[in-house]
Amino acid sequence: MLLQPTFRLIRMTLSENNLNSASRRIRLFPAKGYPKSSTIQPAIVPAPSVLPRYRALRDVFIELKQSLYKEITYTTLLRCAKSLGCEDEAWLTGCQPTELFALSEFVLHRFSRLGKNLIQRRLASKSAPSPESDRGSVLLALREARFSIFTAEDIREGLGVVLCDVLRGEMAFVIDEAMDGTIVPQAIMCGRLLKLEDVTFCAGSMLPLSLDTLLLALRSFDPEFDPARRILSCRELDCLEEENLEGFTLSMQFLANAGGLGKFEIADMLDQIDEAARLKKRN
């Protein structure tokens, strides 16, 4: 049954102002003990002259994202939350804003109806914007945005942050005029980047990750992953791999934020991953 007061609260949380300022409010975990990158090709830092174009695209993105969020029902949010292990409905009404945004991104990109997610259905609709327009270009770029885990490598005040994609072995300069005030070096986060023209920015609010979540996620994908390697892979993950990794990462961080991921639980999960890897080798 649709709970109207709760649904209105979620709509308020997903308001334009909150979407525009979500990355300003996050406080990210520093990746203490996780090595900084030294072998990946550095990101190209754009000139400040790109800021007017970034602001124009960002405004289009916020308006478009808000219209997509309006199509997400409370029932769908609850269904997807349960698929990520959040069985208690109270979690959805009491979760942190960054968690709600991460769940909403999961719905936009992963919840399919007749084989298409919300973004693909918008592109296929009669009201789809022209691909030549800014709105159409942003929507197409949003469709191609891929989930990943990032660490903050360098901060440029008033311009943005250099992020390292630890899944694909790439560097990207993310333009965000205020992000440098909320981020710390070597912070870990997950989410998507929107790449359009010479501009790259966050395709939604980034979810802060703990180092434990990062290591569990990478070990779940590759049981032999060694943190000293820094990068999980330099290849493109297929759609199923990416979806499974996103679901596992969100589940683990939601669990950690709720206080349900202590050192004993982490050790037990790592033992299970190791055991699964040993069985796979035998077979």
Image (spheres, grey):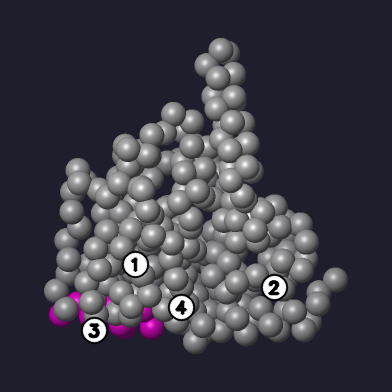
Residue at the location (76% across, 57% down)? 87
- Tell me where residue 170 appears, x and y as whole percent: 28, 49
Would you call the spot at circle 4 few (<14 residues within 10 Å), some (14-19), or many (20 or more)? some
According to the picture, the residue beneath numbered tag 4 turns out to be 25
Between discs 4 and 2, the one toward the N terminus: 4
* Dot in front, 1 or 3: 1
Q: Look at the numbered discs 4 and 2 and tell me whether their residues touch, using CB distance below 8 Å.
A: no
Q: Which segment is the magenta one? A: 49-62
Res. 21 image quadrant: bottom left
Residue at the location (60% across, 72% down)? 96
Question: What amino acid is labelled 2 in the image?
Answer: Gly
Between discs 1 and 3, the one toward the N terminus: 3
Between discs 3 and 2, the one toward the N terminus: 3
- Tell me where residue 276 appears, x and y as whole percent: 59, 26
Residue 184, disc: 1
Would you call the spot at circle 3 few (<14 residues within 10 Å), some (14-19), or many (20 or more)? few
- The quadrant in which the C terminus is found is top right
According to the picture, the residue beneath numbered tag 2 turns out to be 94
